[in-house]
Amino acid sequence: MDFDQARYSRDDVYEPLLSEKDSTTVEVDSEGVLPDDLTRDELTLPGLSEPQLARHYTRLSQMNYSVETGPYPLGSCTMKYNPSFTEDVAADPNAAVHPDRSGRSIQGSLGLLHGLQNYLADIGGMDAVTLQPPAGAAGEFTGILVAKAYHESRGDDRSEIIIPASAHGTNFASAAMAGYDVVELPSDEDGRVDMEALEAAISEETAALMLTNPNTIGLFERDIVEIAEMVHDAGGLLYYDGANLNALLGRARPGDMGFDIMHYNVHKTFATPHGGGGPGAGPVGVVDELAEFLPSPMVRETDAGYELYDPESSIGKVHGFAGNWLVLVKAYAYIARLGDEGLADASAKAVLNANYLASQVDLEVPYGPFHHEFAATAGDRDAADVAKRMLDYGVHPPTTKWPEMVSEAMLTEPTEVEDKASLDDLARAFNEAYADSDEEIESAPSKTSARRIDQVSAARNPRLSWQALGDDE
């Protein structure tokens, strides 16, 4: 949408709808009522009528871009549309159960948690699942702590975790937080794990190899069975980062590939909300040999019903109670609604949409064949500038500048929910933005309600309150 610049500017300050924020100054007669140092002679108050106020906030809301407005093709992030029925389920009064109630009085809640544990275990090919971790990164950390507890129980004090250079930064952070040294693994010329480099990196110090499959640029690790054997032969464990599980739903399972531990990003795979700082959920699944180390409590079914229990050698709690309950309710509702056929259909359409969109953009896509996402390159153009120019064409741009294995990367994932018309709009925005002049690209965006910011200054000198807008520095 093209906005009227004049309506947003006053005294060289740019702010959407600034001219609508009228105020009225009134005189105040408080003489003799209170001490002079507690009074003032005038007071500035909002000067808007109710219709003006309602229309102002309505117009502000229309400036927002959301998943209800259009797609978020952020590669690796998997910004799925969150169906509203899951919100309705989570808002059901029957879901408002205090977690401190006795197990006998919350059998429905425990049954749902037990059902979700089983759903996720079946989907991932795992034997046991904890629902406690409150986010994907927390799931990674939990999984690595489980791996550490496993090795220590065997008297095996290992010091290293191998991670591909293209992995999410949280992989490196999780391994380091757990006390491990990180061994970075390069990619081969095809964009996959460099098998020779892996063979050289694996040793008796290897506690685990952390992998995403398909990897960050949507490529399936074709040597995954051999990779698993190499890691296991060295006494290590294979960890699956569930960031890209959306590409495999109903079609392949990490457990069947040889993975021992995995975390599930329910926001990326099972349509719970993403972004805004939370709450999230990052359940962790493990093979039977590691189940005794999972966080407590977990839910099991007995002859008398469902009950909470502590695994035998649990690493302890990683979150209060049984995790972020309402997020888990939404994940359960999504899986139950889609069923086996629906989940398989979601992954098929995610892969189809990514490949169709890639075929329609004029930018080079250096690696393939890929699955649910692809990394195009902006070539000699600045990927971030092209992305900002895409905003002027009414779409949200993809992830830029990452992974570094693709120069000026534009990592794109349209997900399964977008139809052909939506994908064509995205492709048109890609192509027209990329074909624009240097001047247009470098000054973009020009049609949005907010313009380009000084990102360096914003990062180094953040202003976290509206009161700071008047500061000179």
Image (cartoon, rainbow, N blue to C red):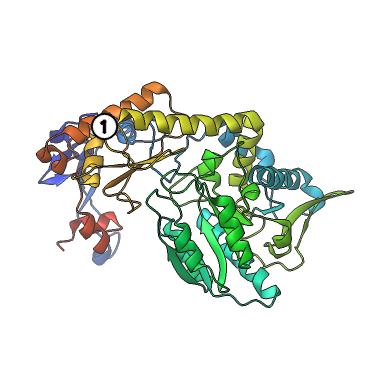
Task: Kindly give the residue lying farthest to the front in the view shown.
Answer: 196
Q: Position of residue 438 (x, y in %)?
A: 11, 40
> Is residue 462 positioned above or below 179 on the image?
above
Name the quadrant of the N terminus: top left
Residue 458 visible in the shown view: yes
In the figure, 173 relative to 287: above or below? below
The spot of residue 352 in percent (x, y) is 46, 29
Q: Image point 32% across, 35% down: which residue?
A: 57
Q: Is residue 440 above or below residue 401?
A: above
Q: Is residue 281 visible?
A: no
Residue type of the residue flagged with mark 1: Asp
Residue farthest toward the right in the current orientation of the protein: 303
Residue 410, percent across and down?
Answer: 31, 43
**Residue at the (76%, 47%) spot, across then down:** 106
Q: Write down the residue under mark 1.
A: 362
- Residue 170 left/right relative to 342: left
Q: Residues within 10 Å of mark 1 (few under 14, many from 20)?
A: some
Tell me if 179 is positioned left or right of 470 in this view. right
Q: Nearer the viewer, residue 179 or 112?
A: 179
Q: Is residue 324 left or right of residue 416?
A: right
- Residue at 44% x, 47% y is 275
Residue extending farthest top: 421
Left or right of 399 in this view: 344: right
Give the percent coordinates (x, y) of residue 227: 56, 56
Give 102 or 81, whichever is nearer the viewer.
81
In what quadrant of the picture does the C terminus appear?
A: bottom left
Secondary structure under tag 1 reads loop
